[in-house]
Amino acid sequence: MIHNIRYRIFVYENEDETVIIDSLCNILPTAKPDKEIAEGLTGNPITIISGKITKKRESKDFVAKLLASEDLDKDKFSKDLDKKMDKNGNLFLRLSKEAALEEKLKIVDSGDSIHLKIKIAAFPAKKEIAIPIAKELFEC
């Protein structure tokens, strides 16, 4: 079970914001993102798109879409759970922006990506309790 999914995407000046939001909606169709403008290290503008999904149905749809992904390596995902989860049971994933444009979900470890913070429903909210729940949820 998932309490919520928070997402964040950095849109750089050479990217089309509308296209990036469309790619987000390919992954989370009901996303209603907020927008904030920040300044990069070199003074260039960066748009930060962020928001939160709280409905169970939407979270279930995301998990189903991820599990159906041809690019999901369940063994690697299972092994990486420990380092991708914090002590409070938040699972941090990065999805390829490029793959999202093609309506695909591809977990990446670095680079230009869609950042997800998935709050696993565990009581008490501890990593040791959340990991087995996440393994069952993501079938790994």
Image: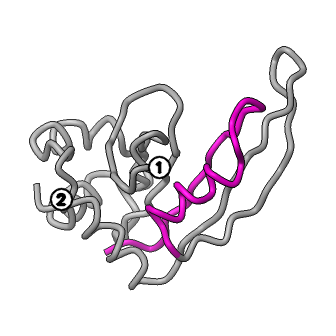
Q: In this view, does 7 lie to the left or right of 36?
A: left
Q: Residue at x 33, y 41 (%)?
A: 107
Q: Residue 40 sits in which quadrant?
A: top right
User: At which x and y percent is residue 30?
Assistant: 54, 77
Question: Which residue is tagged 2?
Answer: 132
Q: In this view, does 4 lie to the left or right of 121?
A: right
Q: Which residue is drawn at 45% across and 39% down?
A: 98
User: At which x and y percent is residue 5?
Assistant: 49, 64
Tell me which amino acid carries mark 1: Leu
Label 1 Cα crowd, 10 Å radius (few <14 / some 14-19 / many 20+)? some
Label 2 Cα crowd, 10 Å radius (few <14 / some 14-19 / many 20+)? some
The disc, 2 or 1, on the residue closer to the chain's N-terminal end is 1
Whether 110 is drawn above or below 98: the answer is above
Q: Which residue is drawn at 43% across and 54% down?
A: 90
User: At which x and y percent is residue 106?
Assistant: 32, 44
Whether 116 is drawn above or below 123: the answer is above
Q: What element carries label 1?
A: helix
Q: Do the residues labelled 2 and 1 touch (CB within 8 Å)?
A: no
Q: Is residue 9 left or right of residue 80?
A: right
Which segment is the magenta one? 1-29
**Closest to the observer, 68 or 63:** 68
Q: Is residue 14 magenta?
A: yes
Q: How many marks?
A: 2
Tell me which amino acid carries mark 2: Pro
Question: Which residue is tagged 1?
Answer: 101
Judging from the image, the colouring scheme is one colour
Q: Residue at x 81, y 17 (%)?
A: 41
Q: Is residue 99 magenta?
A: no
User: At which x and y percent is residue 101?
Assistant: 47, 49
Q: In which quarter of the image is the N terminus?
A: bottom left
Whether 85 is drawn above or below 138: the answer is above
Q: What element carries label 2?
A: helix
